[in-house]
Amino acid sequence: TAREVALMKRNQELEEENMQLREENKKLRGLGVERQAEQDATHVIASSASSIPFKDDLEMLLVLLCEVMRPRKLVPSLPYCDKTALLTQSDCITLAKGFNFLSKTSGTNEDAVGEYFKKYPAMREMSERNPIFEELLVLTSFRLANDAKKYAAVRLIFGALLSTSDTVTDIYMIYLYYSTGETGFAKASLTSLLMNIGLQLLLVFFQNMRQSKWRMFQEMLYVLTLTKPGIDVYRVVIGAEQEVGALVDPKLEMMMTKSFELLCEAIPGAVIQTYAFLTGSNQSGVAVFSLVMSVFTAAFTSTGISFDLDLDKNKRRHMPHFYGYVPDGTRKKVQVFVAMFLMSACHLTAKALACVLCAVESPATVVIYLGLDMTVYLAYKLLRRDFYYFVPIYGIVGVTLSFIARIFVKTVVDYTGNLQMRHPIELGGAYWAFTVLSTPIACFYFGSRYLAFMDNEAEKADELSMVLNSAQVYGMIGGLLLLQVITFASFLRTINPEYIHTFYSTRTGNDNLTVIFLTHEDDEHKLMIFATNKHKWIRIREDVVKWVNEKIPEWNQAQPEWWDARRKAMVPDWAVHDKEVLKSIRSEEVVKVQEQRRKSIINTAKATETVQLPHNAGAIRRRSILADAKKLASEND
């Protein structure tokens, strides 16, 4: 009818208007970003504009700072621009990308600005004409970093609240288990909680053993009152520095506390409460809430560790081929963090469910499954000659430490899928991928065995308070797998694509150290190879010794800032051929540092035997070095 035709035309007109409005909104959003960038840049230079002697530089400075403030993807390497005059808009964009790159990869804001002037002569000349320019760039770098710190502070505070809530709910569940007569679950939960508190108390003791007794009491009280996570976060947020006599700095102390909680309380709590929920008598809402809190706490802690390490400036600077998958920009960072969190939560739930379904049939089967899984992993490390951990401790102590470290890392990946542990010195990308993929397979296998057991053992099934049918079992497993696949696909789509290969790389810790030493140009960073286990770089031992013997006289003459007593103490006596050169780097201060290191490494002086090279090590080393260098070059390309 005529009315219907009129309505159809009106609908078409409305659709066209909506499309025009959407296009205008896009333009306004883009214009809003540019206006915000211009406002930020103007705010930075407004108070100092009158101090700029050369007014001709003011316009270009405003353009440059606008480009710096505008959100953009971080470039993988420092862009090149050697022009000193007649800079165009394109040159300003290149210079802005270079400044953003140095701000993200330098240790301090001042270091970023200093390196910026070295790399770009046009900026150096502008700084000479306008002394205030350096101060403006430092302020700009601080503002960029400060925006990121605000989100980091919110995340840390949320993590502390989550951690404290998990501990409180665990204590309440222990009370419920005792009150309902389920003492086995209560004792298991209490043991995991006491292990976490005990390790935190031990850390506090060593951290404050040189402080006053009142300070020691205060710190231990934080642990016992469950406020330790909040105190650690507060110290990191305000930028507290390492105190004199403290074992580690506040950030590392917080990460160690998180690791204890992850391994001793959050992961065991999730498994115990899942088992109690499916086989015990308590399926209340409180039990569900406590289980969810345990899973979320473990996932959040694991995600935070990986996320923070990837954003670390020093790690991105020294290992750009591994660190840097988290993209620049707040929105993308949030997307990556949420995807990592959901992946970890799904992985932990699936692993706990697999263990519980297996334990219902036979607890001994769980022990066999976990033991066989760990044995295969240790055999893999031994066959690839990558068993030794990177810490420079040798002899029986070194072997024991490596064994414990390997089990610890494997356990964390088994239950959380921690992304940091794909690092070559840990599991490696290939074995990390194998571990993550094997969990859903184990879930389906033990799910089918659980259903067969329920059908064949009707009497034992009647003893359980909850029996799952096939739709429930496969529905839970399938749902977890589907969510994990979706979040992992979203994660890969959001991260910087040049780092995807690190999730399946076959490079070992030995290969990683070899490639870093042979391709890195920074002497300070190359010298750090002596801070790692010498078994890890046995293939290039001769090259390292030759290099350090050539460099020490140069360093003694040039005296770079980093060539201090601590760095000199890292060079072992056996690596220096000339006795006079060795004597020149063994001052009283250096000897004192060496003595302190010996005392802190559990009597490792007895186990510093020389590692013998095989008779054909030269040919093996040359072939391996060439292959590693070519592989790294292709990855960089």
Image (cartoon, rainbow, N blue to C red):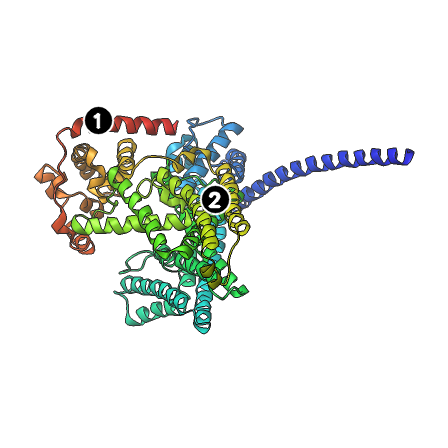
Residue 581 shows up from this direction: yes
Question: With respect to residue 27, does 450 lie above or below?
Answer: below
Q: Is residue 50 visible?
A: no
Q: Nearer the viewer, residue 198 or 459?
A: 459
Decide which of tag 1 and tag 2 comes sooner along the chain.
2
Horizontal arrangement in the rendering, residue 525 relative to residue 361 (left or right): left
Instruction: Give the answer, above or below, for where 324 lies relative to 179.
Output: above
Quadrant of the drawing holding the N terminus: top right
Residue displayed at 54% across by 48% down: 475
Q: Residue at x 34, y 48 (%)?
A: 410
Q: Position of residue 498 (x, y in %)?
A: 43, 33
* Left or right: where 114 falls relative to 573: right
Instruction: Report the front residue among 177 and 563.
Output: 177
Which is in the foreground here, disc 1 or disc 2? 1
Res 210 → quadrant: bottom left
Looking at the image, is 174 positioned above or below residue 470?
below
Q: Which quadrant holds residue 237?
A: bottom left
**Is 286 or 276 nearer to us in this picture?**
276
Residue 119, horizontal then vertical, whole percent: 38, 32
Q: Is residue 144 left or right of residue 11?
A: left
Residue 6 rendering spot, x and y as whole percentages: 87, 34
Check disc 1 and report the residue beneath it. 622
Label 1: which secondary element = helix
State the residue position of label 2.
140
